Amino acid sequence: MNKPVVVSEETLTEPVLVSDVEPGAKGAAGPAYVVLAGISFSHFLNDTMQSLIASVYPILKDTYALDFAQIGMITLAFQFTASLLQPVVGHYTDKKAQPYSLSIGMASTFFGLLLLSVAHQYLVILVAAALVGLGSAVFHPESARIARLASGGRYGFAQSVFQLGGSFGTSMGPVLAALIVVPFGQGSIAWFSSIAFLAILILWRIGRWYEPQIKAKKTAVDQAHPDAPNSRRVVAALLVLVALLFSKQLYVSSLSSYYIFYLIDRFGVSTQAAQMYLFIFLAANAVGAFLGGPLGDRFGRKIVIWISILGALPFTLALPYAGLYASAVLSVIIGLIISSTTSSIIVFAQELVPHRFGMISGVFFGVAFGIGGLGAAVLGKLADHTSIAFVYQVCAYLPAIGLLAVFLPKLPRHAR
């Protein structure tokens, strides 16, 4: 059993062993909980600010007379910078780690929020969204690496703690929009720049902990396990994981971007009420994202991937035909099940290519953002030509892609 490690002010500056260890191995250090809590809280702050963009869509749509395609383009502007740059950032930091890049990247989010609060032209709104996306591109690859460094060998658990902060932050966006942005208007978005400033301070402190780990990291060489799949199977497995992430993320994107409009259009609820229903779905996502990692550590990531993708299919098929309250219940079930796969997919990919950790993390986080952005634009265009209800009928079949999990290889025991 891993034992908790108490991390004091002094131990935050001590090097830690970063080579992979089997969870539960004798003598293995436990997770550095202070660092995990700090990076998870930073993820919470980061994704809270990001989720504000989607949450203020109704305000922007009414104020500037935007159509659904233009709404989708705002999401694409935000997600495109994050998607395009994350693998680049990860590849660069694999070669040369940048301990203070997280706080510098958060400054881009800080300025993006300020610009969004005063933007009165569509092009300026797109630029502001892109700046927030840039901050996300810098944040995710290195923060995922820090979470693994602090895991003590419990990689699924550490990834889940990291994902929990982001998922919970995403769920807070609609609530904050309903309580603050809707009553006080677009200018109130500037108030959230204070959150970005707090995140900058926390990430700077984490950078001080991370800096001495870089020297330790250089001395730890990743060795391929003798039972690991060959390079051909690794490439095939990575393609399968991308397809599985596509099915999960595109469905979640359809709810995150258009669920508010769906509820307003079909059930006639108010904007604030619709935002609270969206919060319920996103909160269920946060809980599911946290549970998925430890379950993957315990039972194997491949099993969790199977259950979490295909298990959501009956509920996604029922959602377009449910009433208001049944839709809320189904959204909770879908969020709990489908989001539990995120940590397992990312850790599975990291363990397939351990010597390219930053790049793989960047690719998969980037793919997630890119799918969300591109999917939002395509689904918005489809909604303009058909209806929001039709979009959800089509998206209901996305979890069936989970059948591809049959092609995932069996990993060695220490990398399940």
Image (cartoon, rainbow, N blue to C red):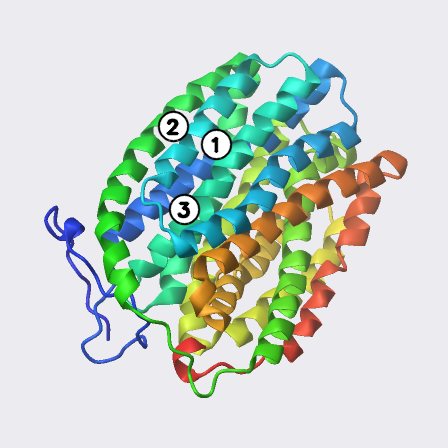
State the image coordinates of residue 133 (x, y, percent, origin top left): 55, 36
Circle 2: element type: helix
| C-alpha gap between disc 3 and disc 1 | 12 Å
Q: Is residue 189 left or right of residue 267?
A: left
User: Residue flagged by tag 2: what amino acid is it?
Assistant: Ile
In which quadrant is the N terminus drawn? bottom left
Residue at image point 55% right, 82% down: 230
Residue at label 3?
Answer: 165
Q: Which mark is residue 306?
A: none
Q: Which mark is residue 195?
A: 2
Crowding at dot 3, Cα within 10 Å, few <14 / some 14-19 / many 20+, comes out as many
Q: Is residue 258 left or right of residue 410?
A: right
Q: Which mark is residue 49?
A: 1
Circle 1: element type: helix
Does residue 258 sit above or below 159 in this rendering?
above
Crowding at dot 2, Cα within 10 Å, few <14 / some 14-19 / many 20+, comes out as some
Q: Is residue 321 visible?
A: no
| C-alpha gap between disc 1 and disc 2 | 8 Å
| C-alpha gap between disc 2 and disc 3 | 14 Å
User: Residue flagged by tag 3: what amino acid is it?
Assistant: Gly
The image quarter containing residue 219 is bottom left
Q: Is residue 345 left or right of residue 15?
A: right
State the image coordinates of residue 223 (x, y, percent, origin top left): 38, 77
In which quadrant is the C terminus drawn? bottom left
The single residue placed furthest to the left in the displayed view is 10
